[in-house]
Image: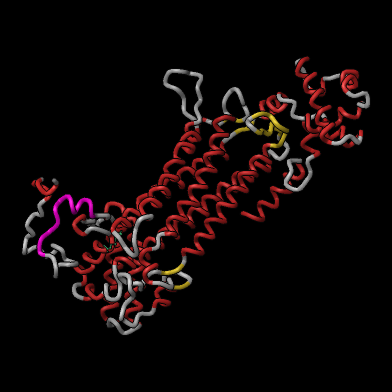
């Protein structure tokens, strides 16, 4: 069907156009259809890889000369020319051309314009297949390092605020029902742990990524006497990849970046959801300043936590990127297929989203003001010290916990019926449930006593939280 469309037929290639199929002109005489050029080109997005492409080419040219594959004069011309290309891109004067398809061919074709013949020797013993795998790995490696730094900055903000609020009481929830009192500092430190695991995943991914595909060539290796260890070292890799077929077809490093990033985004989304809840008048736990909220065009009283909602909302982009890449790769036979050109945009999009969401979250954590009275009011609502009452019965009366749970449950029922808190029940009322109650029980029914008692490792007692803050600084910052 498509072949009947007039625009599907390749336009005749101007025989005198030196750029026409410059890189595979031997075999091809016609140029691509306009739509072919459009679907085929990746320069619109892979220009992001220009620094990596130039670094990779410099390492390759240096190695080719060291191995006597090109002359030192050609190497010097190539290195100088590549610096000039870099300067043009940096200065914004470089003309990115769709007819040159991708960043690799744009750089090489411009190099040829600048230095002539020596440029033609740069592509000896390599292919765009190992070139793009190397460039993309270098880019993802930097992205992993940026992600780690952004995660660390958020941890620092959380730890600072946790220290400030090591003793600020709030309700702890299960099922979003008040469960037991905790401190806000303790709650924030939970996120510090999540982000710490995220950073561990980033570190693991970086270590696995750090093998250099350059020298795998098109897929099978090369007959030239190259030194793969040399280019690997020059580009900061630990070693060359062991198998050339795998070297050009592996995109696990991108998947691992997106998988780790998806978990980061999920963590940020959970925190964002809490921020959204916490600043409602119903919760009234925190307030965000004008810096991180918007008003309503119609309801003057509104102060909406848009940044938090967007952090929550953008999570889908990152998870979607992981999904795109998995689906793109899953049916591909070894080695390279053009489908793989689709690997970059999801990663670029996820990287931008993660950087934005992490910066916004760090900003909100530093911006938020806590309403201790609001937190306290909420903590008092749901009989949060019922477990403390049961524990007192166990310890003071020697009753098994299951029976103590039953006794405490009856006290809750009575308080509920009276519309009061547990500590508002009189001793007579408590003794009507179990005659062995004494005055001592009131000691454990306050929120302060409840949190202060939870001194077990990782628990919510303010002193334990302060120690955890100090430990977290040492572990993460
Ligand atoms: N633009 C391509 C990509 O991003 C570069 C590799 C092209 N290789 C090839 N055999 N056509 O995947």
Please tell me whether residue 56 is drawn above or below residue 159 in the rendered image: below
Please tell me whether residue 208 is drawn above or below residue 221 in the rendered image: above
Where is the C terminus found, in terms of image quarters? bottom right
Span colored in magenta: 29-40
Please identify the quarter of the rendering in which residue 364 is found. Answer: top right
Q: Residue at x 46, y 41 (%)?
A: 315
Colouring of the image: secondary structure
Please identify the quarter of the rendering in which residue 385 is found. Answer: top right
Where is the N terminus found, in terms of image quarters? top left
Please tell me whether residue 283 is drawn above or below residue 6 in the rendered image: above
Does 448 appear in magenta?
no
Extreme-bottom residue of the structure: 68
Counting from the top left corner in percent of width and height, residue 276 is at: 54, 31
Q: Is residue 343 left or right of residue 142?
A: left
Q: Is residue 43 left or right of residue 305?
A: left
Counting from the top left corner in percent of width and height, residue 61 is at: 32, 75
Q: Is residue 155 left or right of residue 229?
A: right
Counting from the top left corner in percent of width and height, residue 391 is at: 83, 35
Q: Quadrant of ligand 1?
A: bottom left
Extreme-top residue of the structure: 418
Q: Residue at x 6, y 60 (%)?
A: 14
Q: Residue at x 34, y 64 (%)?
A: 334
Please tell me whether residue 465 is drawn above or below residue 290 in the rendered image: below
Q: Residue at x 66, y 34 (%)?
A: 174
Counting from the top left corner in percent of width and height, residue 179 is at: 70, 31
Please identify the quarter of the rendering in which residue 382 is found. Answer: top right
């Amino acid at each position: 069907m498509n072949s009947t469309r007039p625009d599907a037929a390749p336009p005749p290639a101007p025989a005198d156009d030196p750029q026409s199929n410059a890189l595979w002109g031997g075999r091809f005489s016609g140029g691509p259809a306009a739509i072919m050029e459009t679907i085929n080109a990746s320069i619109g997005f892979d220009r992001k890889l220009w620094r990596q492409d130039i670094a990779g080419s410099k390492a390759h040219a240096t190695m080719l000369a060291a191995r006597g594959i090109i002359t030192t004069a050609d190497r010097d011309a190539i290195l100088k020319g590549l610096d000039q290309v870099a300067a043009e891109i940096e200065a914004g004067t470089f003309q990115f051309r769709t007819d040159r398809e991708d960043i690799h061919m744009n750089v090489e074709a411009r190099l040829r314009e600048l230095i002539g013949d020596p440029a033609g020797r740069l592509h000896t013993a390599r292919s765009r297949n190992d070139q793009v795998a190397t460039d993309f790995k270098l880019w993802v490696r930097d992205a992993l390092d940026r992600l780690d730094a952004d995660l660390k900055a958020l941890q620092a903000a959380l730890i600072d605020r946790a220290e400030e609020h090591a003793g600020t009481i709030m309700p702890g929830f299960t099922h979003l029902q008040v469960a037991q009192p905790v401190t806000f500092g303790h709650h924030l430190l939970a996120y510090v742990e999540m982000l710490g695991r995220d950073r561990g995943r980033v570190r693991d991914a970086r270590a696995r990524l750090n093998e250099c595909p350059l020298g795998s060539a098109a897929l099978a290796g090369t007959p030239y006497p190259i030194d793969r260890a040399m280019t690997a070292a020059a580009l900061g890799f630990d070693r060359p990849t062991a198998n050339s077929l795998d070297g050009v077809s592996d995109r696990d490093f991108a998947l691992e970046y997106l998988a780790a990033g998806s978990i980061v985004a999920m963590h940020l989304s959970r925190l964002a959801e809490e921020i959204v809840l916490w600043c409602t008048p119903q919760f009234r736990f925190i307030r965000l300043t004008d810096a991180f909220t918007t008003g309503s065009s119609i309801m003057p009283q509104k102060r909406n936590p848009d940044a938090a909602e967007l952090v929550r909302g953008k999570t889908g982009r990152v998870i979607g990127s992981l999904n795109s890449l998995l689906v793109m790769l899953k049916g591909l036979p070894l080695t390279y297929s053009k489908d793989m050109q689709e690997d970059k945009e999801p990663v670029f999009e996820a990287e931008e989203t993660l950087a934005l969401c992490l910066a916004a979250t760090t900003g909100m954590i530093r911006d938020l003001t806590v309403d201790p009275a609001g937190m306290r009011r909420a903590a008092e609502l749901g009989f949060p010290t019922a477990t403390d009452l049961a524990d007192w019965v166990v310890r003071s009366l020697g009753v098994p916990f299951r029976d103590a749970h039953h006794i405490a449950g009856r006290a809750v029922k009575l308080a509920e019926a009276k519309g009061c808190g547990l500590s508002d029940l009189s001793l007579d009322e408590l003794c009507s449930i179990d005659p062995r109650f004494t005055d001592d029980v009131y000691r454990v029914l306050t929120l302060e006593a409840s949190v202060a008692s939870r001194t077990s490792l990782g628990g919510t007692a303010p002193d334990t939280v302060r120690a955890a803050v100090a430990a977290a600084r040492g572990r993460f910052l």
